[in-house]
Amino acid sequence: MRLAKRIENLPPYLFVEITKKIAEKKARGEEVISFAIGDPDMPTPPHIIKRLCQAAQDPANHRYPETAGLPELRQAIARWYQKRFDVTFDPDKEVVPLIGAKEGIAHLALCFIDPGDIALVPDPGYPVYAVGTLLMNGKPYYLPLTEENDFLPDLDSIPENILKEAKLLWLNYPNNPTGAVADLDFFNRVVEFARRYDLAVCHDGPYTEVAFDGYQPVSFMQADGAREVGIEFHSFSKTYNMTGWRIGMAVGNATMIDALTRVKSNLDSGIPQAIQLAAIEALDGPQDVIQEHNAVYQRRRDLVVDMLNSIGLETKPSKASLYLWVKVQKGYNSIDFAAELLDQVGVVVTPGIGYGQSGEGYIRLSLTISDAGLVKGLSRLAGWRDSRNKFKVKVT
Ligand SMILES: Cc1ncc(COP(=O)(O)O)c(C=O)c1O
């Protein structure tokens, strides 16, 4: 059997050791507390589930859906963007529903990347931007996101020869994993930059509705001329606790939306129709659930930040997203640090290197952990501080 080179080119799964250790601990009956995954612990709101159940009973929804999605869903997505961001989209040409944003992100590479083509990819970043490029035998060029630059890419530092060859620019704000946000000035500069170098911009914005302290993230599509150069991926996953239902959307540039829809129509058969109808209910139904979820995350964020700072781990409260980006203790790399937390106190965090080289020196904590788990996890971390001081484990 000879697998394709593109499979060999995929980056190694960096969490393999940690995953193995979690399994060992669980097999020994030890309880592991995980801050690792950005999967909302709160359930999908009941009115959305009610609509899903109703729709599932209707035989009209038992058949193949269309790739382009129900016109009613595309219209609801356009209405939501209008209401939330004051941006108007043509539901027939500038909107496509996705089987989760992840599916669209991966498939977009098929629309742009020929072998050897370059995609500009944030580092650290959601791994699928680079993986989609690699699967098409393209070349990711990594844009470091550093604290000094507020975790925004320094576009002016990209060499001209790279820019001449690059076709895609991936961005994601509010950001996974750093929790950083971008403002409209930045997005306006991105549009100018994309025009200058003929880049297609893919902004990934699944966290625009997860925000704290009254902060309201902007959409890339609000930037002047954004629809001439790019699209935005969005999702029902984090806004409405719908990760398990697998539904998202892309909006913006009609040529890009058309290309993505054409690829998808050859590869998948759309989103189950009952789920599309539940998604319409999510967009059109009561939105106060979002504030309720955010209040919970904000309270958790404050608890975690206070505790981490009190044990000497540096982190700032994120304005948005589900994540805290935390500097590891000096003398550790992110994998060793995460492994030690797991070994000593059974707490799982994600090593920053898993999101790219520039993620080294950090770990990511997700706020999607039940209140009970959070309290237990934090008290274990406090205990870890004590034992670490006592035994002087690798403290430099
Ligand atoms: C930045 C980012 N984009 C996309 C996704 C995937 O979203 P979906 O559940 O809609 O596929 C995630 C999920 O964690 C994410 O963090």
Image (cartoon, rainbow, N blue to C red):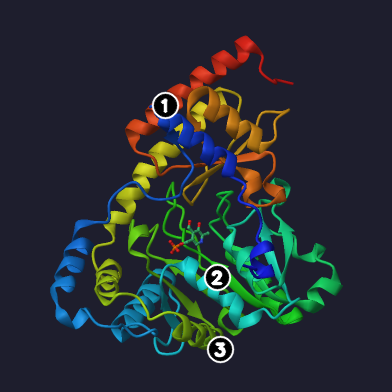
> Cβ(mark 2) to ligand 1 < 8 Å?
no
Which of discs 3 and 1 lies nearer the camera? The answer is 1
Indicate left or right for 301 with 328 as reference: left
Identify residue type, mark 3.
Thr
Residue 185 seen in render: no
What is the crowding at mark 3: few (fewer than 14 residues within 10 Å), some, or many (at least 20)? some
Locate residue 373: give its quadrant: top left
Labels in figure, total: 3
Which of discs 1 and 2 lies nearer the camera? The answer is 1
Residue 318 seen in render: yes
Identify residue type, mark 2.
Ala
In terms of secondary structure, where does tag 1 sit? loop
Compute the Cα span from label 1 to label 2. 38 Å
Q: Position of residue 194 (x, y in %)?
A: 69, 77
Vertical placement of residue 92 versus 306, above or below: below
In terms of secondary structure, where does tag 3 sit? helix
Q: Which residue does the numbered mark 1 point to in the structure image?
A: 28
Q: Which residue does the numbered mark 2 point to in the structure image?
A: 106
Q: Which residue does the numbered mark 3 point to in the structure image?
A: 255
> Which badge, 1 or 2, comes first in the chain's sequence?
1
